[in-house]
């Protein structure tokens, strides 16, 4: 069967995020604890250059370095880019400039935000100073942002030795890693998803090898040619292999143990996965014939259940395992 083309390509916003927990070595611990105390620390490398933010190993010799120094909270913009549309959780919620600032006494630049009324107020070479956060906890956000320091701010090197010792040092941090993006499944999978809304499974056939891909990929990965011939497969299929799940997943209201299986729908050239229900988990087997069970308003089959047909012969599905 040839399916009708979907009216439009689907798109949806997606978010991937997780908390990243890491422990701190002596250099990073001193740097972040110093920020909490309103002190900016760098580290002196083997060639005498002061690096801010500090690193734990010399970028040239790869040797461990711990020669901490205190630098100034004022510095010079070395380069910048205007951010007219701040994203959530960025340093400022109004338009600002991303700047690289070489603090007085440092030889490398620190990336942070500069609070400025507009791009016309930002220039390479301008003098800036740290604006400290009202509440500091030992994180890079203790520097709320940079702000213009004015033409009258003197420029002088300031790199005094520092022990790196503080009371109640910060020894670990939790950083929230987050990625926001807009996902489009493309032409082929849009048709597949549209078919599921009508309780149909739509694949695409390769014009060269004639394999039917479900879900479709838009092109045959073996032959490298576009797949445009849409065909409906299933609804019944054959279990090719399976696993028994004994650990309950968060936010998934299914009692363990249960079975997830690869299912080769009739007419498909490869198997897709689905949960097996309507049968005790220890009776699921390779070759079991199954059919989809849809819930009202469901966007895909809730699970697959036995059809009552005799098991498929191994030779029929062995190439799909």
Image (spheres, helix red, strand yellow):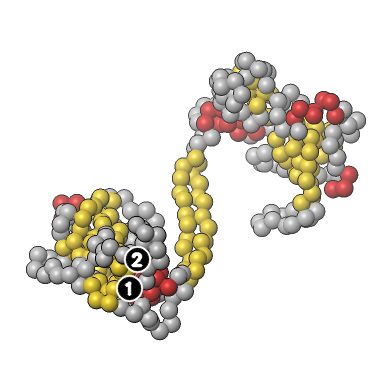
Where residue 132 sits: x, y (%)?
A: 29, 72
The residue lying furthest to the top in this view is 208
23 left or right of 279 in image:
left
> Height in image: 24 above or below 162?
above
175 left or right of 94 in image:
right
Q: Residue beneath label 2, please?
A: 54
Q: Earlier in the sequence, mark 2 or mark 1?
A: 2
Measured in 3D between alpha carbons, the distance from the residue under mark 2 to the one under mark 1, in whole angstroms, is 8 Å
Residue 113 seen by the camera: no
> Height in image: 85 above or below 113?
above
How many C-alpha atoms fall within 10 Å of the one at disc 1: few (<14), some, or many (≥20)?
many
Q: Residue beneath label 1, please?
A: 68
278 left or right of 88 in image:
right
Where residue 82 sits: x, y (%)?
A: 25, 50
Residue at 46%, 42% (x, y): give it: 182
The residue lying furthest to the right in this view is 310
């Amino acid at each position: 069967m040839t399916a009708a083309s979907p009216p439009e390509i689907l798109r949806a916003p997606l978010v991937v995020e997780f908390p990243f927990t890491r422990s701190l070595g002596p250099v990073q611990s001193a740097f972040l604890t110093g920020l909490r105390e309103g002190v900016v620390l760098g580290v002196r490398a083997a060639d005498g250059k002061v690096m801010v933010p500090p690193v734990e190993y010399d970028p040239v010799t790869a040797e461990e370095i711990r020669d901490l120094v205190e630098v100034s909270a004022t510095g010079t913009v070395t380069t910048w880019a205007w951010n007219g549309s701040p994203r959530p959780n960025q340093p400022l919620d109004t338009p600002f400039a991303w700047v690289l600032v070489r603090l007085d006494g440092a030889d490398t630049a620190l990336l942070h935000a500069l609070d400025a009324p507009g791009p016309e107020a930002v220039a390479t070479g301008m003098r800036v100073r740290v604006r400290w956060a009202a509440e500091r906890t030992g994180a890079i956000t203790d520097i709320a942002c940079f702000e213009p320091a004015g033409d009258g701010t003197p420029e002088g090197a300031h790199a005094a030795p520092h022990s790196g010792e503080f009371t109640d040092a910060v020894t670990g941090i939790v950083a929230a890693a987050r990625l926001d993006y807009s996902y489009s499944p493309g032409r082929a999978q849009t048709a597949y998803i549209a078919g599921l809304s009508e309780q149909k499974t739509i694949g695409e056939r390769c014009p060269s090898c004639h394999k039917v891909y479900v879900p479709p990929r838009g092109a045959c990965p073996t032959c490298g040619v576009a797949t445009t011939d849409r065909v409906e497969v299933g609804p019944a299929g054959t279990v090719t292999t399976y696993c028994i799940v004994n650990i309950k997943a968060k936010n998934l209201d299914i009692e363990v143990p249960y079975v997830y299986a690869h299912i080769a729908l009739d007419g498909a050239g490869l198997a897709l996965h689905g949960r097996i229900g309507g049968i005790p988990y220890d009776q699921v087997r390779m070759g079991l014939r199954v059919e989809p069970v849809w819930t009202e308003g469901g966007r895909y089959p809730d699970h697959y259940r036995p059809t009552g047909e005799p098991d498929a012969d191994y030779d029929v599905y062995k190439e799909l395992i």
